[in-house]
Image (cartoon, grey):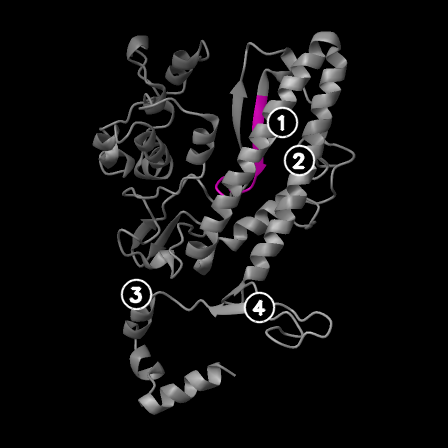
Amino acid sequence: LYAKDVVSFAKSIGLYPEQGKNEDFSFSDTYDPVSFTGARLAEARMWTLFNKLSGGGVAEYLDYAQGFNLTNRMPLFVKPSSPLSLNDTMELMRSHGEDTWFDPRGVARSDVGAGPGHSPYRWRPLTWTQGSNSFVNERTVGTQQTAWSFVASSRAWMPAPLRAIMWWAPDDSSTGVRIPVFGGSTLLPKSFADPVGQEPGAAVSYGVAADAGRMSLDSAFWVYNLVANMAYGNRYAEVYPVIHEKVIKFQQTLMKKASEVESKAAEIYREEPRAAVKFLSEFVAETGDYVTGEWREFWMYLFARYRDGFTVEAPVLPQCQGDEREACTSRSIPNVKQSGYPADWYGRIVSDGDNKKHYQIPTKNDLNKIKAIEKL
């Protein structure tokens, strides 16, 4: 698909030679010639997805995605090595370039930017300077500044209100569970709706009053953002796997429920189309608000477990009940573990500047005293 004047317009503004042939015209080369940052910050994201989809089938285009060889253009499409499920597509949207050349976690190669928690996230800007040189951060698929993302399915064989379903989530695409929104729905979840709207026509009167500067724990965006932020920074290696596991399980539950609902809606539609639309709409609204509530509870669980540099787990001993006094405690006392840092990070601390001299404990006796104090 393209505008009829796509070539003539380029000629009129001097982007394509007046005598240039239409059949030789390249939209990309003319309107947006690929550059190092264009390849590294955009094409590299697709390379990581294509490489996984094709079982390594785009390895030969790595130097292009790196931005080092812009003449080795990567294909616009690749054929997956096996059929993709809806779940497969969602998992691709959670990618951080793991186990590829672009992996920023500092696992396969040392990277101080990953911090002690081996985080793939880097704070903006994407490009930065040090001295007279410029540098780039990797731009992963799952990233913190995502406003929203979705995975859509089109099913031409289904009744009109059911043909399109959009699995939608605000914020980081790697840390959020996606809610089902049917194309025929006439309602939105309150927690996902906005009484102002990005455009006036998109305003929903019953939406939660919140925006980028006003936080609300009833707003899906803010709740999703809270969960995502638990994975950022030094605790990534501990927290992200917990979030990922929760997302997978919750998503499977929602997909199963949506499948049951659309089967029921299709039956209703055969007799009463309007009733089917009402049924779908109420499901979308109720499900979205239910997910927001569950995700808020999940954030509270994460915050209670991973706080102040500790990992807080369930008590070893139960709380005493009634006259109990043996093998129990009067108050619930959690099992608290000091997270500390990985051994290689402690090595970096010691080797940095004069830290070895500054922080070193002079005698073994003093070290034993410190350990005794820490137990108090």
User: Percent position (x, y) of residue 219?
Assistant: 68, 44
Residue range highlighted in magenta: 165-174
Q: Nearer the viewer, residue 276 or 172?
A: 276
SS class of the residue under badge 3? helix
Q: Residues within 10 Å of mark 2 (few under 14, many from 20)?
A: many
User: Percent position (x, y) of residue 367?
Assistant: 37, 86
Residue type at mark 1 is Val
Could you give the CA–CA distance between mark 1 and mark 4, rounded to whole angstroms?
40 Å
The answer to whether the residues at label 1 and label 2 have Cβ atoms under 8 Å apart is yes
Q: Residues within 10 Å of mark 1 (few under 14, many from 20)?
A: many
Q: Provide the residue designation for mark 3.
A: 344
Could you give the CA–CA distance between mark 2 and mark 3, rounded to whole angstroms?
43 Å
Q: Provide the residue designation for mark 4.
A: 334
Q: Which mark is residue 372?
A: none
Residue type at mark 3 is Asp
- Main SS, magenta region, reads strand
Q: Earlier in the sequence, mark 3 or mark 1?
A: 1
